[in-house]
Image (cartoon, rainbow, N blue to C red):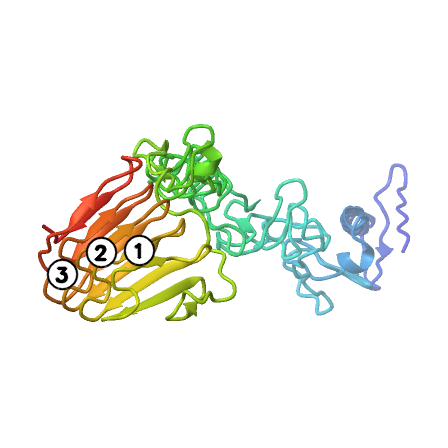
Amino acid sequence: MTLRMRSMKGSAASLSTGVDGCRRPPRAIASAALAKSLYIVRVGRLARILLGACAGLGLAACLQPNPDFGVSVTEGSSSSSGSSASSTTAASPTCGDGVIDPGEACDDGNDDNTDACLDSCVAARCGDGFVQVGVEPCDDGNDVNTDACVGGCVPASCGDGFVQEGVEECDDGNGDNTDACSNSCTAAACGDGIIGPGEVCDDGNGDNTDDCLNTCVPASCGDGFVQAGVESCDGDDLGGQLCADMGLPPGELACSGACDFDTSSCACGNSQAPLGGMCPAACTGGCDGSTCQIDCFGGGDCVGGTVDCPDGWICRVFCSGNNACNGTTVNCNEYGCDVECNQLEACSGALIQCGDGSCDLTCGSGKDVCLNAELRCGANDSMITCSQPQATTLTPAGSSACACVSAGCD
């Protein structure tokens, strides 16, 4: 509609016809036209402002109802706040639209859960189950400190004070290697090379010949282990040494209380093994292994005679019966012999000569069973044993280091 105003110089304005067919003065018509033009200008300006604000969102998003705007725009219409036009629709907030709406802590417009804003429009934090790049090394979304990711969103490690299941035996969170938990998060134990509670030493090996035993106590004389370079022997451990290794005659090598070799018995005892073999005829009682048994009976051939133990055999002489070995001389060999006497004067007046071997005379039951018997000791241990008081003679001979004793004899 075009308004055209006319005026006549020197005369009053003529009446004009308005849009509604009514005749009005030209000034009234001009005022109405001006008001309508200003309304159109205001609406157009508001539309341009809205279109400029929506340029970054797209027309479709902009046309969604939004109560934060005073004016809603729909296709083919526009209205200001308070308008009751039926074609107007209010826009609703949407997480992910890049606009921080009420109820949203953040909105970065993406679905990346490794940045500072999750796709649920809440700020990323430790414990949300998403690893924030550049901020957290791990995030398992729980408060369990025995798995691979502990509180604070840091990976579990030895020394953090939490025992990681299946990985660590212990974790006391300190740097003390001498307590119950080592710095490698293993329980302290003898043999781990660290002197822990209750240990005097710990060299981390099972060698009992050095200065620390595998029980984590220092080596000492009497512990039963030969300390290399310090002890020659220890208790029964002679290191496989014999009297012959000491350059001494056969005998019994021992260990002193100071863990040195005791060679005092190296001239006593029998260090040689008997030869054995085919049983000699002299073994009237037969042979058992390397032992030859000689039987002498009462009134037999042994009375007043000589019994020689065969070479290469251990000899056992049984004098059983009245006067069985009365006045008999028994000659033992280097492997020793045992003479057993029983019954009345079974070995009365007998002479047992030990020679280089070890011999024992046993006087058993019977009256005067070893009356006036004599045991002549040789270079090795020998003994007379009596079950009842006997008038016997013990003749020491040879090395004084050997025992030549009597037990229960007069």
Which residue shows up at 23% across the image and 44% down it? 404
Residue 317 to residue 224: above or below? below
Left/right placement of residue 407 relative to residue 278 reads: left
Q: 248 and 382: which one is in front?
A: 382
As measured in the structure, the alpha-carbon distance from the residue carrying label 3 to the one carrying label 1 is 21 Å
Query: Which badge, 2 or 3, comes first in the chain's sequence?
Result: 2
Mark 2: few/some/many CA within 10 Å (<14, 14-19, 20+): many
Q: Position of residue 6 (x, y in %)?
A: 90, 45
Dot 2: what SS? loop
Residue sitting at 20 percent across and 50 percent down? 374
Amino acid identity at mark 2:
Ala
Q: Label 3: state its secondary structure.
A: loop
Q: Position of residue 319 (x, y in %)?
A: 25, 66
**Label 3 vs 1, first from the N-terminus:** 1
What's the distance in space between the residues labelled 2 and 3, CA to CA? 17 Å
The amino acid beneath tag 3 is Ser
Asked if labels 3 and 2 touch by Cβ distance under 8 angstroms, the answer is no
Q: Which residue matches tag 1? A: 330
Crowd rating for badge 3 (residues with CA inside 10 Å; few <14, some 14–19, many 20+):
some
Left or right: residue 288 versus residue 362 is right
Mark 3 or 1, closer to the camera: 1
Observer-nearest residue: 69 or 317?
Answer: 317
Q: Is residue 138 above or below residue 265?
A: below
Which mark is first along the chain, 2 or 1?
1
Q: Secondary structure at mark 1?
A: strand
Dividing the image into 4 quarters, which one contains the N terminus?
A: bottom right
Given residues 325 and 391, the one toward you in this image is: 325
Amino acid on which the number 1 mark rests in the picture: Val
Q: List the residue tagged with mark 3.
A: 387
Badge number at residue 350:
2
In the picture, measured across the screen, residue 33 lies left or right of residue 178, that is right
Taking depth in this image into account, of 74 and 123 the one nearest to the observer is: 123
